[in-house]
Amino acid sequence: MADAFETLRPPDEATRRSVLQLAARTATPLPDQLRADLIDPRPGVVAVCRRDSATGSAVAYAQASPVSAAAWQIAAVPARERVALGALLGTLRATTGGHSARAVWWTSDHDAPEVATRLGLRPDRELLHMAVGLPLRSVGEHTIATRPFRTGIDEPAWLDLNRAAFAWHPEQGGWDLATLRQRQAEPWWDPAGFLVHERDGRMIGFCWTKIHADHDPPLGEIYVIGVDPAAHGRGLGAALTRAGLDSLARRGLRHGMLYVDAANTAAVAVYRRLGFVVTDTQRAFVADLPAASTGDESPTTEEPR
């Protein structure tokens, strides 16, 4: 028998350990933002956890990370945990601070449409997981000059460029210095794999790579790639992607991957020309969160399955 849900703002150290163990037991990969805000929570992170009454260990968990003033990215462990998602949505609806907001659940779970429908979420975007062998075969793309990211120097310029490059993106465009610092504190952080392209002394493009050393075999990821909108149309996106993949190959990686929004057809076409193929699709389901009313409200939850 499991206890009722506990609301956490933010998750504490004991919960962090228990959730990591739950993810390992259920072979559930933790989404990047969920993991970062579980280990080093930013202000505003909200979670709900249901623990086993006998052991105290987490049996269901869901977390919301604020990615902008009006949006949360949510995730659950295990991914299909309908009860945890329902409790989290109820908590968010009751604590939106007087402003309407939007919650986005990303998952590749095959039961997601049924779960989303029961929780009142609607389909939104699709995220493609694409993979390629390394080193790349020659496809005639031009090379580009890059340099490594300079920690402690490049943060302001990169944040400005990232906001401009992803002004349309509800998650990536909302990064601030605290979000970047979270990633710089991760064990995989390596400024040598964060490639910056400049023109006339100004940063106009970047390709940030990440190595998944705990994967068998290790994977090299194009983590984030961005180009100044004023420099679009010059082939910089393809050239930066190739530079990042070549960098991963030089560090011994033989498998490359990335995630891309399915609606970004131009980027998908570039990746296909480089040899990437789609290996999985994640889907986003969204919920509108009305402004909280005055007075106390109890989170709505579903009955356990």
Image (cartoon, grey):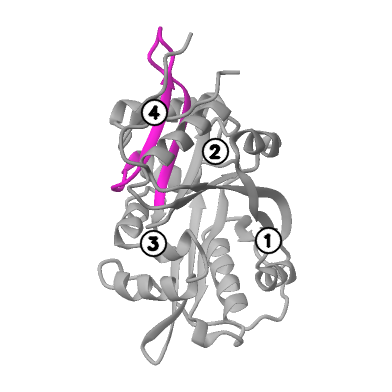
Relative image position of residue 118 (x, y in whole percent): 64, 33
Which residue is located at x 34 percent, y 49 percent?
98
Residue 53 among those drawn in magenta:
yes
Q: CA distance from mark 2 to mark 3?
A: 22 Å
Residue for badge 2: 29
Real-space Cα separation, disc 4 to disc 1, in angstroms: 37 Å
Front one among 178 and 193: 178
Quadrant of residue 190 in the image? bottom left
Query: Residue under circle 1?
Result: 262
Q: Is residue 277 left or right of residue 247?
A: right
Residue drawn at x 42%, y 71% as measured from the top left? 163
**Residue tagged 4:** 298
Q: Amino acid at mark 2?
A: Pro
The disc, 1 or 3, on the residue closer to the chain's N-terminal end is: 3
User: Of circles 2 and 3, which is in front?
Assistant: 3
Residue 123 horizontal/vertical position (percent): 66, 49
Q: Are marks 1 and 3 in contact (CB under 8 Å)?
A: no
Disc 4 vs disc 1: which is toward the camera? 4
- Numbered range of the magenta stretch: 39-66
Q: Which residue is mark 3?
A: 175
Comes first in the chain, label 2 or label 3: 2
Residue at 70% of width from left, 69% of height from top? 265
The crowding category of the residue bearing disc 3, from other C-alpha atoms within 10 Å (few below 14, some 14 to 19, many at least 20), is some
- Viewer-side label of 1, 2: 1
Q: Of residues 126 and 269, which is closer to you in this image?
A: 126
Determine whether, in the image, residue 246 is placed left or right of residue 189.
right
Residue 5 in the image: state x and y as whole percent: 41, 22
Label drawn at residue 249: none
